[in-house]
Image (spheres, rainbow, N blue to C red):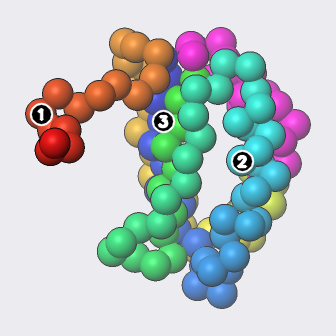
Amino acid sequence: MIFIAVKFTVRPEYSAGWIERVEEFTSSTRAEEGNVFFEWSRSVDDPHQYVLLEAFRDGEAGARHVESEHFKTAMAWMPDFISRTPEIVNVEVPGTGWSAMAELSPRG
């Protein structure tokens, strides 16, 4: 599985509406064959930073994502809304998705 984490720092005037702005990109990516997950979160340290966790079944699915029209469209408009170059971690990991954490589970 290809696992990707990206930190997007959004210009302050656009940060409140970021999730709505990326809605089409998000739904189109989630509908891709080979997408495992595509999940946005807002940083607790920086109100203008969003973290995207995404995974694809394999490198081929990841490559199809980068070649998709919705990816190209997002890459075309995003430079106007971000305040700095996103930071990324992109690794290949064993598995097919989320696993249960061995060290912690609910009581009772």
- Looking at the rendered structure, the kind of residue marked 1 is Glu
Name the residue tied to disc 2.
Answer: 26
Name the residue tied to disc 3.
Answer: 4
Q: Is residue 35 left or right of residue 32?
A: left
Residue 1: % across, % down? 48, 17
SS of the residue at dot 1?
loop
- Looking at the rendered structure, the kind of residue marked 2 is Thr
Query: CB under 8 Å between callouts 3 and 1?
Result: no
Residue 80: % across, % down? 74, 70
Name the residue tied to disc 1.
Answer: 103
For the point 81% across and 52% down, the residue is 24
In the image, residue 17 above or below residue 108: below
Q: Is residue 37 left or right of residue 88?
A: right
Task: Please say whether residue 33 is one of the residues in the magenta stretch.
Answer: no
- Looking at the rendered structure, the kind of residue marked 3 is Ile
Q: Closer to the camera, 78 or 29?
A: 29
Residue 55: % across, % down? 53, 29
